Image: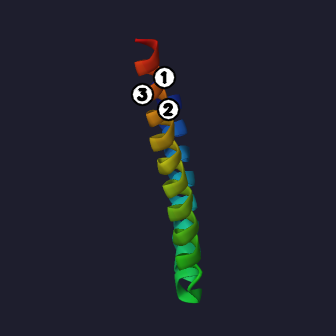
Amino acid sequence: MKARYSLATLIFILLATNICSAQTEMADAMRANGKIYVVVAVLATIFAGIFAYLIVLDRKITKAEKLIK
């Protein structure tokens, strides 16, 4: 039974290494073309939107809690 888990672990590690290698090549290509900045800008915009939404939601919840008390 133990050999079975080690074989599965080995296969997982080999697949993960292959995927990471492909992602590195893609990132290098995007960096060379200047597209990585577009990706970073989009991700920053999404996270800023989520952060702003959470702040607004927290304020609304705090206001509702004060009204209940």
Q: Is residue 65 above or below residue 53?
A: above
Question: Which residue position is annotated with label 1?
Answer: 64
Assess whether mark 3 and mark 1 are in contact (beta carbons under 8 angstroms).
yes
**Relative horizontal placement of residue 67, taking residue 29 as reference (left or right):** left
Question: Which residue position is annotated with label 3?
Answer: 62
Mark-to-mark CA distance, 3 and 2: 5 Å
Which residue type carries mark 1? Answer: Ala
Which residue type carries mark 2? Answer: Lys
Q: Is residue 23 above or below residue 25?
A: above
Q: Identify the secondary structure beneath mark 2.
A: helix
Q: Residue furthest front?
A: 67
Question: Which residue position is annotated with label 2?
Answer: 60
Towards the viewer: 38 or 33:
38
Assess whether mark 2 and mark 3 are in contact (beta carbons under 8 angstroms).
yes
Mark 2 burial class by Cα count in 10 Å: few <14, some 14-19, many 20+: few
Mark-to-mark CA distance, 1 and 2: 6 Å
Q: Is residue 45 above or below residue 36?
A: above
Assess whether mark 2 and mark 1 are in contact (beta carbons under 8 angstroms).
yes
Q: What is the x, y in percent for residue 9?
A: 49, 39
